[in-house]
Image (cartoon, rainbow, N blue to C red):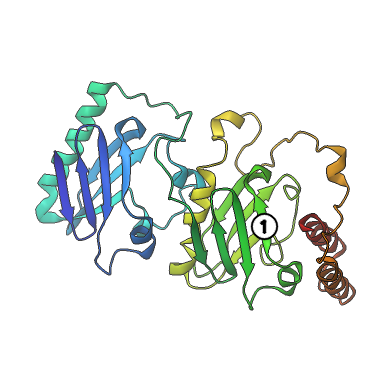
Amino acid sequence: MAEIIQRDGTWAFDGSTVRITPGLHRSVPLFRQTYGEIAVPLEAVAGVAYEPERKRGRLRLRLREGADPLLQATGGRLPEPADPYRLVVDIDRSGVAEYVAEEIRRALLLEEIPKEPARTYLVPGPPVPVSVRSSDGTVSFDGTQVRIDWSDTSDRVKRATGPRIIDLPDLVQVEWLPNSGYEDGFLRFVTRDSVFSKLPPEKDPFALDLWGSARRDLLTALVATAVMARLPHPSTRSGEYAQGDPPRLPAAPAEDSVPRLPRQGHHDVLLRRLRELGELHRDGVLTDEEFATTKAAVLRDF
């Protein structure tokens, strides 16, 4: 067993798994403490390095592309202190850090772990259900459905559409960008019907606009990761979807192009929301495109 215990957290390697446990000190970011322990199988590891510095060093674990839904969902955009695959090491423990890194490297050589991208997720995502309250609303995922309940400060367009419920089979991608303090971030759920939407996050009924506390809004990556872990692995659609490009999707059945009739008892709610959207359109709050997209989303929900 190779193990290093620091205020920032603990890494333990037993020859087959790197077990990463976040520290409990207040200096450890809320995201890492909330995400909890991560068990990384050796087959998911691409490499490891210890980077010594003047006062302290850093252990860094590099994972194979496509092995971890967290890295897939965040696209390397997690702030460095929130990165669970990085451990701050006191300078007097640099020898231990080097030993842990060397043990992992030796095991990688002995087991002949491939370096090419993984074709399935090898690291589990966070357990469900998971729910996070952000600046734009509360987003929840129970393993089968995503639900967004807008906050009182959300844009009027979003509040007019009501809670957003998205079934997992309708999702084709999750897009996430943290807010930096200078620019807003977002968590967007891309569906077959919304894939070509040009709405900005603050008005998009399929997106959370992240503009508040960066510390709290960063937790939305938990939901993004939980959803990503349950979507088809990127390797199964490598020819269909590239980051930043819309997927080429099969044509929707003809019946999907016809709005469903509202269920009994929901008629008044539907009329009220459509009336509110119409008022926003007439007042110039919504453009023609925004009005059409948002109206279609409301009709789909009913």
Q: Nearer the viewer, residue 144 or 134?
A: 144
Residue 5 point in image, percent of width and height: 16, 53
Q: Nearer the viewer, residue 166 or 187?
A: 166
In the picture provided, is 86 more to the left or to the right than 178? Answer: left
In the picture provided, is 174 more to the left or to the right than 220? Answer: right
Residue 69 point in image, percent of width and height: 47, 43
Q: Quadrant of the C terminus?
A: bottom right
Q: Quadrant of the N terminus?
A: top left
Disc 1 packing (10 Å; few <14; some 14–19; many ≥20) = some
Residue at 37 percent across and 38 percent down: it is: 63
Number of numbered discs overlaid on the protein picture: 1
Q: Nearer the viewer, residue 260 or 220?
A: 260
Residue at 87 percent across and 63 percent down: it is: 288
Residue 84 position (above or below residue 213): above
Residue 130 position (above or below residue 253): below
Circle 1 — which element? strand
**Snapshot quadrant of residue 49:** top left
Amino acid on which the number 1 mark rests in the picture: Ile
**Snapshot quadrant of residue 141:** bottom right
Residue 155 point in image, percent of width and height: 70, 73
Residue at 60 percent across and 42 percent down: it is: 243
Residue at 84 percent across and 59 percent down: it is: 262
Residue 202 point in image, percent of width and height: 67, 67
Q: Which residue is mark 1?
A: 165
